[in-house]
Amino acid sequence: MLSQSPVSNSVIKAPLPVGTLRPRLDVTTLKDGHHPTWSELKGKVVVVDFWATWCAPCLASFPKLNDLKSQSVGMPVEFISVTYETREQVEPVLKKFPLHTTVSLDDDFRTFKAFNAWGIPSVFVFDKKGSLAAVVYPEDVSLALIRTVLDGGIPKVEQEKAWSDPAGAEASFRALREKAVKAEHQQ
C-alpha cells in the first residue's frame, strides 16, 4: 500500500509549486460523464483532492471534505475528487463512504501526472484565476484556508511534500488499475 513518504533530501518541494497556473484537468465526472474545464471553473476557488478506494487516509478525509463542501454553499467554490480507479471500483466504496464532491475519474493518469499527485491523499487549492494557492494534506484544508484563497491570499500553511518515487507510484497505480480492468472484463 502506498502512503505518504516525503522526499528525504534537504530540498523538499510541493508536488506543484504555488503559483502554477491551471495544470491539465482531464477527468470525467462519475455522476454524468462531464469533462470539467478550467474555463467553466473560472471565478471559483477549486479544491481538487486525489484519492483511491484502497487508501484509508483518503476515505477518512471524506467527512471533512463533505463538511467543507456544505459550509461553502453559496460561495464560489468547487470541490473535485479525482481517482484513477474504475467506476466499478469506486461506486461500491462510495455507497459505504459517501463523498459529496464532484467525484471524477482519471482513467489515463493525465491529471495525476499534470498535478504530480502521486502521494495520496492530496489536496490542491486553486484561486479564482486558476493559480495554485496551496497543496496540503486533507487534515490541513479548512474553511479558513478556503476563505483566504477566496480573498485572493496565499494561505500560510505547510505545503505538502513531494512523493519520493513518482515513477514507482505511477507504475503501482497503473498496475492496480490494469488488474481491476482485467477482472471487470472477465466478469
Image (cartoon, helix red, strand yellow):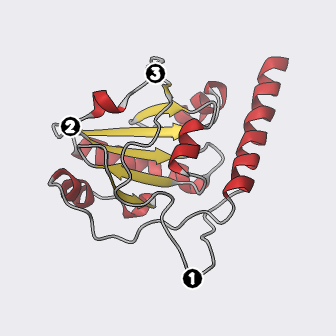
Q: Which residue corresponds to the image point at 30% horizontal and 29% vertical from the top-left?
A: 39
Question: Residue 36, image x and y in percent?
Answer: 39, 27
Q: Are marks 1 and 2 in contact (CB under 8 Å)?
A: no
Q: Secondary structure at mark 1?
A: loop
Sequence order check: which comes first, mark 3 or mark 1? 1
Quarter of the rendering containing residue 22: top left
Gap between marks 1 and 2, in whole Å?
A: 37 Å
Q: Is residue 56 above or below residue 79?
A: below
Q: Is residue 114 left or right of residue 109?
A: left
Q: Is residue 186 above or below residue 165?
A: above
Q: Secondary structure at mark 3?
A: loop
Foreground tag (3 vs 2): 2
Question: Residue 2, image x and y in percent?
Answer: 69, 57
Gap between marks 3 and 2, in whole Å?
A: 23 Å
Sequence order check: which comes first, mark 1 or mark 2? 1
* Residue position for label 3: 31
